Image (cartoon, helix red, strand yellow):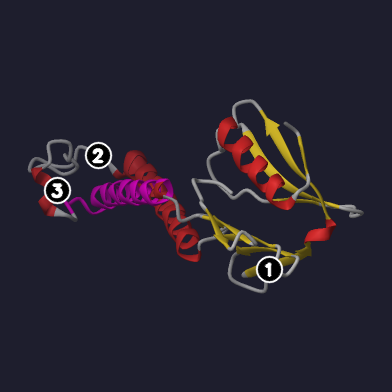
Amino acid sequence: MINNEQPQTANNLIRRYIILGERRTSNYLWASIVLLGSCGFLITGLSSYYGTNLVPFLQVLPFYTVVPEGGATVSFFPQGLLMSFYGTLGFLLSFYWWFNIFWNVGGGFNEFNKKEGKIRIFRWGYPGKNRRIDLSYLLKDVEAIKVELKQGLDPQRTIYLKLKGRRAGEIPLTGIGEPLTLKEIEKQASELANFLQVSLEGL
């Protein structure tokens, strides 16, 4: 339950929370910025290596002065080589990012079904045997809804499903991404605890 996901209900017996996963607006934005930036670095490095502008129309831009008429202002070694290296790394990083968005890693839903007495937690993973992560639990096994708050440079606010009599009985319900505000985490955890009629821990 993160990134403004909205619960979907049916006759007050089924509640489903959509998890956005990697298909968030911020990921689309940053993946595009990294791709464009890495292409610029890579083209600049290759242009310095070949001694010519590989993309001539970029000469109209005031900041693009790799190979003016009098000769190259960026030598291949070391500037061009470093720019090619960083451009390649950025290019690979952006492709990895776009593949995550395409696969929607971490996306899915949490479904709480009072009609069937079951909880279903579904997530998309990486391609392979764990591409579909589909977990199912009984409502009667739920002991509580737990909230964990971690402050610091990388604050984390997570809602857990606490199960009875299990060694690893805390199942995270929140998705991957920016943390919810304290007000949002309190509201969602309280709503879920009331819906399941269990206690709320951590607040």
The kind of residue tagged 2 is: Val
CB-based contact (under 8 Å), mark 2 and mark 3: no
Q: Which residue is mark 2?
A: 74
The kind of residue tagged 3 is: Leu
Camera-nearest residue between 11 and 101: 11
Comes first in the chain, label 1 or label 3: 3
Magenta range: 26-53
The quarter of the displayed image where residue 136 is located: bottom right
Q: Which residue is mark 1?
A: 134
Which dot, 2 or 3, sits closer to the camera?
3
| Residue ID at (23%, 54%) | 50
Q: Residues within 10 Å of mark 3 (few under 14, many from 20)?
A: few
**Picture coordinates of residue 123, whole percent (x, y):** 62, 62
- Inspect this view and state whether residue 54 appears: yes
Q: Which residue is mark 3?
A: 58
Q: Residues within 10 Å of mark 2 (few under 14, many from 20)?
A: some
Q: Is residue 10 magenta?
A: no
The kind of residue tagged 1 is: Asp
Residue ranking furthest to the top: 152
Q: Is residue 74 left or right of residue 164?
A: left
Predominant secondary structure, magenta span: helix
- Inspect this view and state whether residue 110 appears: no
**Picture coordinates of residue 190, whole percent (x, y):** 66, 40
Q: Circle 2 — which element?
A: loop
Which dot, 1 or 2, sits closer to the camera?
1
Q: Circle 1 — which element?
A: strand
| Residue ID at (17%, 36%) | 63
Comes first in the chain, label 1 or label 2: 2
Q: Circle 3 — which element?
A: helix
| Residue ID at (66%, 51%) | 173
User: Compared to 129, does 121 lie above or below?
Assistant: above
